[in-house]
Amino acid sequence: MLVCAAFPAQRPAVSASQGNFSMSAIFPKWTNRLPVMVIIGAILIGTGLCAGAWYYLTPKYSRVGYQPIQPVAFSHATHAGQLGVDCRYCHNAVEKAWFSNIPASSTCMNCHNQVLKDDPRLALIRESAQSGQPVPWVQIHRVPDFVYFNHSVHVDRGISCVECHGPINKMDEVYHYQPLSMTFCLDCHRHPENKLRPLDKITDLNWKPESEEKQREFGQKAIAQWHVESLQNCSACHR
Amino acid sequence: MKTHSVPSFQQESGRAYWRSLDALAETPEFRLWVEREFPEGASEWTDPVSRRQFTKIMSASFLLAGLGLAGGGCRRPVEKLEPFGKMPENYIHGLPQFYATAMPTQTSAIPLVAKSNDGRPTKLEGNALHPDSNGGTDRYAQATILNLYDPDRATRFLNGGKNAPAEAALDFLAQLSRNAQSNGGQGLSFLADRTSSPSRLRLQKLIQTKLPQSKWYAYEPVDLDLHRRAASQAFGQSVRPYYAFDKADVIVSLDCDFLGSEEDSHNHIAKFSSRRGIEKPSDSLNRLYVIESLMTVTGFNADHRLRVAGSAVLQAAAALAAEIIKQGAPNGLENAGKPAGADPAWLSGCAQDLLENRGKSLVVAGHRQPLAVHLLAHAINAALGNVGSTVMLLPVEQVAEQGIVELAQELNAGRVDTLFILGGNPAYNAPADLDWAKTQRKAKTVARLGYYEDETSTGCDWHFPAAHFLESWGDARTADGTLVPIQPLIAPLFGGLTDIEILARIAGAAVADPYSIVRETFAGFVGGGDLEASWRKFLHDGFLQNSSSKPVQAQLNTGAVSQSLAAMKVEAPTKDKLEVAFHRDYSLDDGRYNNNGWLQELPDPATKLVWDNAVLVSRKTAAELGVKNSEVVEISVGGRSVRGPIWVQPGLADYTLGLAFGYGRKQTGRVGTGTGFNAYAIRTSQTFGFAPGATLRSTGETYPLSCTQDHWSMEGRPIIREANLEQFRKKPRFAKGMEIEDGEEQRSMYPNPFDQLKEKGLHQWGMSIDLNRCVGCSACMVACQSENNVPIVGKEQVKRGREMHWLRIDRYYSGRPLAPKGTEQARVNFLETFHREQEQQFEDWIENPQVVTQPMLCQHCEAAPCENVCPVNATSHDQEGLNVMTYNRCVGTRYCSNNCPYKVRRFNYFDYNKRPLKELYLGPFGHRKDDEWDLIKMIKNPDVSVRMRGVMEKCTYCIQRIEQAKIAQKTRAGASGDVVVPTDSFTTACAQACPAGAIVFGNLKDPESRVSKLKQLDRDYSVLELLYTRPRTTYLARIRNPNPKMPDHYYSEGPSTLQEYDQKHADPFREEGAAAERGAESAGKGAH
């Protein structure tokens, strides 16, 4: 009690004898603005982080445009575009299975045992068809393991390759065209009428509807006549 | 265009294995590495980079890494797509392929269709095309695929316990063959397990002609060949019995577990249950009498069950025979004596029922019983005119062979030079008096073909790894004699051989590859014609048409029956002279499935124990001996003893100890090590079925047992609803009347949240489970596990209630109320009867219980309580009525599981798939070894997510199958509206495996579907309907068919569960007018 009572009396004396030692010397004036600066800084950095994550951590950024180097310089533009080979000549399981197969080297050799027989760019393919060893193509389009996407039910029911894979027939080297995120899937599943097309136009990647109205008109007719479900239940994709 | 250098094939495709360490060791780098104490750079600082420079470089690297991250480095790891170099024909990646094959059993086979995903078999189903199959399977057939991928199976050739090259082992075989052919097989003996394979029979005969001095011995610890021997003796010619359970109105089982542990039980279940699926009150039911010592699956389904010691079954059979066989009765029936503890009126009532059903009845004897009981059963069947109607005698070709006891004598006499053991595991399961491990070594050379490196292989000079039946060619004959192919789905994973290949090599046959052998046998069956075409059809169909055996006529040889009776002496067991009854385990068989995790974790249908066997005793015996559950006791009989924990089993005969085979293995794999105790230790060649004169001593220790259903009774709740046939005929809708809170006024005031969504669905899925057909065999549980990638969790986790089975079978006992119905005493008794789990083992209502089994799985409630409480919408409803689970959304709050009234949701407390069972608590440090993981992942169904730690899971109605069926139909439909899946074109895994046809799944929106029709039946009810959850899975009430003339007439008042319900609530057979009165009464009691 005594000590406490004595303090107020002593304090002024100390500051008087050492005049230049004050609180302002330890914390200069600008520190008063520090909390505001910290808050503004945190908001700026937070916004930056959020914006960064928003942009960079989405499939739209991380997947679209992905164009790995493939072991063989196969050009879809030449084959599917210029020569007009149907998608299903090589990807022949697309109408039957969930997986659209990458053709076996023997499929390539169906033509290339006649055409460009000795081209060095095809050395790997020839070797593979001979030995049976696979060509290690780099996977571009991939959905997570808990998504059970099925190719056959889409291409057999009016959804074209181009909707997810883009204008493959114009790509020299294939790149990831659409984000293939859950939003991307749901956009179409909520409004299938914008994408449905006649079944004979599925692999015609250049096909365009006459107009937006015509597209919607056809789409709505198809939904009614074909009983297109375009499921939005969790169970449609996740099992 | 950008290109880059051509990658090398060997590095890019597949894994690089160190195929030759020797070659590697010769490189200078490797020599240097070996010679240095530490790798270069680890022990000296030779780098000119200074610390400052290092920091600089590292900072720059981090900066670059950061930029790389922002600039597109945040991408999933690169994955390669490796298509075929040469495309195989008819192969489409992503579409499974199906092949017909068969699982060989001791004296029969199970016809199967195997599913192959990208070249690896993943699921086995029954072959419904087979003339004697309805497409059902048993639990072993469902689980055997796990044995194929067992990392602990034999993977190498061994010579004297050391690795040997395959060439050396085959050289040994060639040498053996040359020696044998030079001396006619002198000193060469074979010890083989049993099989129905005609190819092996052919080779066995070839060996006997080419090597006449060689000897053939057969041994199986569970002797299912006894049925053939008994029939052959009874009828004086080489025949085996074939039972037509579907043609029998009255069936009497003499300790014969034909629905559980006998051969072809799945086939028997199919036929038995086909007479239980009563649909209209005018339909008839069969009636089953069971006389047995242990509580078996067959006992569960008995309309009348007599509990006697195993040795007294002979006396019961003699008593039945004495009443039934009036003319030409065998001698010695009267000398057998009366079975202790059995009511003579019961036996005469049973005999009377048999007499009233001449030609439509069936008496069967079990493999545990001595030959005399089998012969008596045949005598009774013959006297009743059943032979030719319900018992067929099928001719069977037999070659000279002896048993293991004779082989032991030969070995002891030193007359065996080379012993070749084909399959089996005699060092573990041979009779204890033969001291097999030592006896086996008395041969100069012992060679063995075995699936595991087990107790027997330790004492062998040569060990050959055996191929799984899914890896090898073979053949077999099913119970009706139809020839079935065993077709491989994958090349032998570890270069295993088959028995026919070994035999062909030893016999020096011209062709020794199994394919050619089997094809040659097949050619013998079809005779002429286009062999290639019929062979292809044979492989496609999975059986050879019209190849079943034609029944023969035969006269009973009464003399043989009398002779067998003369030798029998029965001594009733007492407290000091207990009787040990050995039984084939419902999970592990004779021990061959010891290292199969699915079967280890499959609860025993009766005890519900997992991962262990126990000493089963009745309540009275336990009380008199002063032992209780989990107490370790020592059983001594004939100077041998074994220790095991006690388990009080309701319905067991008094003074009987039930010991299951298959556990207590000394040398087994990672899964089976340390489970249970070895019952073979006290089984001798004299006491093969049961051993009298045993004593029991408590050791004072306890052993923890894991049981999946501690509480045994329903306590009067209408979870299972059952009635007797007369009651059902009087009031067919009784099951609806048993609802605790019925009447519209008590229904929920809120609309069903699902009603709106329902209209959008093309299909509405539902399931109906017929409790009258379900026998409790548990095939569905294993099928579900196989289809849905359900992991095993181990004994400790089961003890904590963390088992992952999506489908379980609840087994309830119900006892006869001791006081007359309606009295105050009855009510008091009732309330006092049911206590806590620990006390149930001491209560006397369990002495003679009735048993009911109920498959319990997600009920897919329309108003699902689980969905309301999920904070993240991980569980929700789809428009086709499925309660679906989105694993990647689940955060593991477990609220849904808490709110589920049926307790069918399962939570992954650990990464059960990724971590070995013993390392669950090690977190990320616990991981499977590569060899284990490489094999185990091959069994996974690629269409079902493998769930990780922290997510909830449950039955999905096999959504992968539903989606596949819908997608298949939609792709077929193309630009048409024909998108509804055809009626009953697919089903769930459990329904497909069920041999009884008890589980039916389908589209409720389709009035023609089987499930829609079943749901219209009067017997249809839902469990806990008072909660208004509106389950999509409903049950069909059970109808028993007791004989009103029997002394255990209390069954006529209704099954015990019904009487319990009556005590607690009210009589469901009351007059309709009394409903209001009852409503008031039950309000006072409160809902349970």
Image (cartoon, helix red, strand yellow):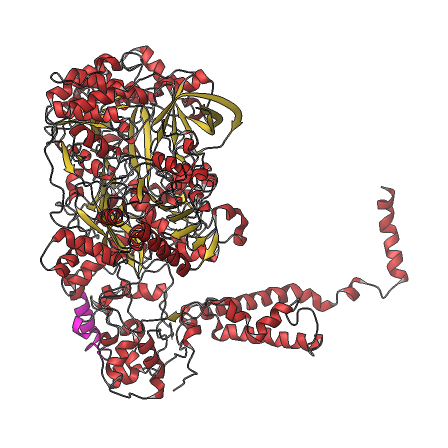
Q: Residue furthest front?
A: B183
Query: In this image, B277 relative to A237: left or right?
Result: left
Q: Can you give x and y, in whole percent of width and height, for residue B707 in the image?
A: 42, 33
Q: Is residue B62 above or below residue B224?
A: below
Task: Quarter of the image for the C terminus of chain B: give it.
Answer: top left
Q: Is residue A201 magenta?
A: yes
Of all residues, the one furthest to the right in this rendering is A17
Front in this rendered view, residue B1031 or B474: B474
- Relative to A33, is B307 on the left or the right? left
Q: Which quadrant is the N terminus of chain B positioned in?
A: bottom left
Of residues B519 and A8, the one nearer the viewer is: B519
Residue B1049 seen in this snapshot: no
The magenta stretch is A199-221
Residue B64 picture location, percent across and down? 56, 76
Location of residue B238 in the rendering, given as x and y in whole percent from the top left corner: 18, 36
B617 in relation to B216, above or below: above
The image shows residue B288 at horizontal and vertical percentages of: 20, 26
Q: Which residue is rendered at x = 88% and y = 52% of the image?
A: A10
Residue B740: quadrant of the picture: top left
Asked if the stretch drawn in magenta spans residue B382, the answer is no
> Quick check: B676 left or right of B984?
right
Q: Is residue B5 above or below residue B602?
A: below
Toward the viewer: B192 or B835?
B192
| Closest to the observer, B402 or B396 | B402
